[in-house]
Amino acid sequence: MLEIKNLHALAGDRPVIKGIDLNIAAGEVHAIMGPNGSGKSTLSNILAGRPGYTVTQGEVRYAGQDLLDMPTEIRAREGVFLAFQYPVEIPGVGNSYFLKTSVNTVRTHRGEEELDAMDFLSLCQEKMKLVEMPGELMDRAINEGFSGGEKKRNEVLQMLLLEPKLCILDETDSGLDIDALRIVAGGVNAMRSPDRAMLVITHYQRLLDYIVPDHVHVLQDGKIVRSGDKHLASELEAKGYGWIGQAE
Amino acid sequence: MASENAELRKLADEQYKYGFVTAIEADQLPPGLSEEVVRLISAKKEEPEWLLEFRLKALARFQEMLAEDHEPTWAKVDYPKIDYQNIIYYSAPKTSPEVESLDEVDPELLRTYEKLGISLEEQKRLSGVKVAVDAVFDSVSVATTFRDELEKKGIIFCSFSEAVREHPDLIKKYLGSVVPYSDNFFACLNSAVFSDGSFAYIPKGVRCPMELSTYFRINSAGTGQFERTLLVADEGASVSYLEGCTAPMRDENQLHAAVVELVALDDASIKYSTVQNWYPGDVNGVGGIYNFVTKRGACRGKRSKISWTQVETGSAITWKYPSCILQGDDSTGEFYSVALTNNCQQADTGTKMIHIGKNTKSTIISKGISAGRGQQSYRGLVKIGRGAEGARNYSQCDSLLLGDECGAHTFPYLEVGNPGATVEHEATTSKIGEDQIFYCLQRGLSEEDAVSLIVNGFCKEVLRELPMEFAVEAQNLLAVSLEGSVG
């Protein structure tokens, strides 16, 4: 599904990604862990196509296509979804209107029929239950005045509605209390499927107690310094990131 | 940022759809301003002596102001000096403009209105959404629909010239009572040479059952348009009035200097909405309308209310301050405005709220959007008179910048003469967020849709004040799709 080969990139004019190789097959859940400033968020931003980053070397293929060559909105329509660490507020734009526009844009791209207001509403209500999202949030402006937990639920709700092929979760656990974490993880787990790949980016191991990964990678200074299975995460939690440096 | 700017520029460069010219023969006076011209206009309209005198007084005052170089320069707009002798002050379609029914209207003219999306015939036939339309083409009112139905309720809605003939007492009583002929430079010019416009009178206790609407169209080259609108809501009456404007694309600048006067008596309410889309000129600022307009409403009666809503997307230069004089105790004035400037457009717009009566309230919500090299200023005066005990004002002025070559400026003036008054003012300026655009793109929206969505969200508080019939046009004008977001 996703093949990253020898990726080097700048954030602004600062080298941040310094040679990443990573393959994620459909059906797999990979976690990337690492200390602050290791390049985790930069990687997710590059994959999603955020402006401000320059790839200097390497390539990224997504479902057989050159991902880096695709405009941001086409990546999204082709099934690349980024759950934001800090979802932005857009005043005056109704959340449900935004979601409906987004869902129908992606459906049209896939050659599916647009959903009318009634069908969208019932689909939305079904998915909202999964993340225990209060109905009144749909009538508010996008993320405006939402609590941290509500913003993250809104992200996962969008993921559930858009049914992407590659889900990138950028520090989805940040700012969540344990109940919210459980709910959000429940929504993500409901998305696990043999046709779907997931990349979970996190600083802490606790998210991985709920979303159990197939593979764990440790990112340090722009490079993957160690890979392993889910046990690597617990080891890291116990020994800290410093341990990896010492072990080498 | 680079691609964002390109997209914004593309949006800003959207072509003007209403730029066609209608091939219609016009009865025109030669260019120039003189007593003779004013007398000719008055004679063509078979006006009574008192109205001619009103015009001549205005002309005399205007010529004085012109001689003393009193053209206002305080607005933050920049344009070459206007040669007032080079403007045609009267132009009318040659086919008899005074018609009994639409069948007698020049079919070419009706097609023009159809192109503009206002089919007068359609309006007559459809009974669903009712909007009574008065269409003003160059200087003359060409057709008013739904007259009979309105007459049954005692509502008068007709062209200004007709009102002068058929309801001279009302005109004599109210004309110039809110905007005196000597009020300001452009109002003074209008008072001398105004050609036509709309008049409406809503009698005591009557709620006007449909939207009243006037569509203004400048067609002929070299002409100025100087229309005059007068709306009177008698005690307990209410009315919602809509105004729309377009013009052909021309390389020259054309002057539009209108005057609108509103009068609300006890318990009356007037809602006045404008979607202004005069030709803005091309990308380089060649051509376009100079929109120098005086609009003022008087809340004369107790508990009366006047509400202005405007969506200003057109004109090369806009100079316009729809205002309320809150004379009656407990009266209310409102001003909701969206102004969009792109390319080389300039707008200096805002409002004046003059609180005279006790417990008078006013609300000002102004949303300015600048793109391209557009320059835009909000200029507002809130004046609380000495006797305006308990007066309240709330003002909010927000500016949104698209790209980095445009500008937004805010000039609020406050004069508080009564210590028991409450005045609040809030102002914000923001750039359209790169993060907001990225968020939308990541959800599959195109950049164009993302910008529209964000701009539309920014204007929502104003757009929702528009009557449904106009909301659609306004949203399209802002290149915004609102489908499904309401309800």
Image (cartoon, rainbow, N blue to C red):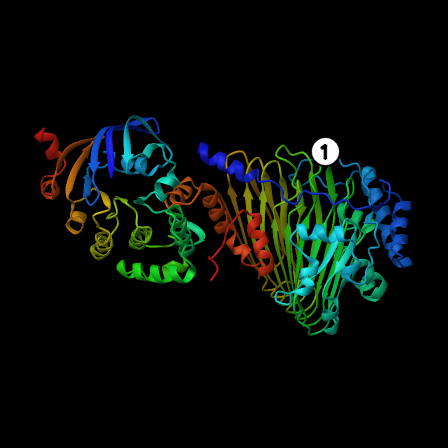
- Looking at the rendered structure, the kind of residue marked 1 is Pro
Q: Residue furthest front?
A: A111
Is residue B241 shown to the viewer in this render?
A: yes
> Hey, which quadrant is residue B286 in on the image?
top right
Element class at badge 1: loop
* Residue B327, x across and y down, in percent: 68, 63
> Toward which corner of the image does residue B253 lie, by quadrant?
top right
Q: For this view, does A55 lie left or right of residue B17?
A: left
Q: How many dots with numbers?
A: 1
**x, y percent for residue A152:** 29, 51
- Left or right, B121 with respect to B456, comes to right
Q: Residue at x 23, y 44 (%)?
A: A198
Picture residue at 88% right of the left edge, 57% below the top: B47
The image position of residue A174, as x and y in percent, is: 25, 47
Location of residue B385 (image quadrant): bottom right
- Could you tell me if residue B414 is visible in this image? no
* Image position, residue A149 (x, y; %): 28, 54
Say which of B77 and A107 sits in front.
Answer: A107
User: Does B305 sit left or right of B452 as displayed?
Assistant: right
Residue that mark 1 sits on: B80
Q: Nearer the viewer, residue B314 or B431?
A: B314
Q: Residue at x 36, y 37 (%)?
A: A50
Nearer to me, B46 or A190:
A190
Crowd rating for badge 1 (residues with CA inside 10 Å; few <14, some 14–19, many 20+):
few
Is the N terminus of chain A in the top left, top right, bottom left or bottom right quadrant?
top left
Q: Is residue A68 left or right of residue B404?
A: left
Look at the picture and state if A176 lies above or below B72: below
The chain holding disc 1 is B
Quarter of the image for the C terminus of chain A: give it.
top left
